[in-house]
Image: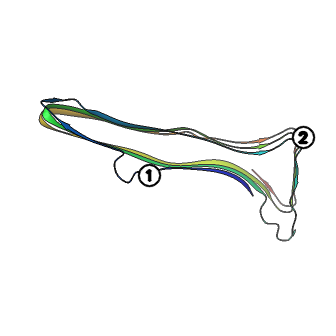
Amino acid sequence: DIDAINNTSKAPSGWNVNSGSGGLIDLPAASSISTITNNTVVTVGSLTDITQTGDRNNPGTFEFDALNNVIAADKVQMNAGGAVALAKGVSTINAKINNASVNIGDGAVLQSLGDVAMGARAAGDISTTVAVDVYGLAGAPIGSSTSNFIADNQINIGDATELLALQDVVL
């Protein structure tokens, strides 16, 4: 196997931001913004010749895989009190670039005793949480929570490339 794997993890043990304030007129704000970028590439160069050796009856694996795995959580808590309390909390995770690609160059030759398998993929588990509490004579809590995940997965096979398998070619 030829694997390229990016594992990104942001797991808070509590609140990423925990803020409290008070006063006659209280206008606090708290935010947490995270940006996650993954570019994962498996490249077989042009004119490369890779031949799997071993037992034809038990060939094992002949795989080329690129994977981006994102697990991220973010939590913002805001407490404000006063005669007039206007509090704002923002939690944002932007994982907008998760590129996974397998690139086989021009004229490469890949020969397998079993399957030739190639895969490019991404997985995301993202959560954002905001809790805003106000107390006093008058108050208005404002909260915004945004989670973004975008993936671009590609398998690129060059010109005059040969994929030879005694079983299957799996893309």
Secondary structure of the residue carrying tag 1 is loop
Q: In this view, does 42 lie above or below 81?
A: below
Q: How many labels does the image show?
A: 2
- Residue kind at label 2, given as amino acid type: Ala
Image quadrant holding the N terminus, namely: bottom right
What's the mark number on residue 160?
Answer: 2
SS label for mark 2: loop
Residue 145 visible in the snapshot? no
Q: In which quarter of the image is residue 100?
A: top right
User: How is this picture coloured?
Assistant: rainbow
Relative image position of residue 163 (x, y in whole percent): 86, 50
Q: Nearer the viewer, residue 80 or 95?
A: 80
Q: Residue at x 83, y 62 (%)?
A: 114
- Residue 44 seen in this snapshot: yes
Q: Which residue is drawn at 70% across and 53% down?
A: 3
Q: Quadrant of residue 76?
A: top left
Q: Residue 47 carries which label?
A: none
* Disc 2 residue crowd, few under 14, some 14–19, many 20+, Cα 10 Å: few
In the image, is residue 171 above or below residue 31? Answer: below
What's the amino acid at mark 1? Ala
* Residue 11 numbered tag: 1
As drawn, is 42 to the left or to the right of 34? right
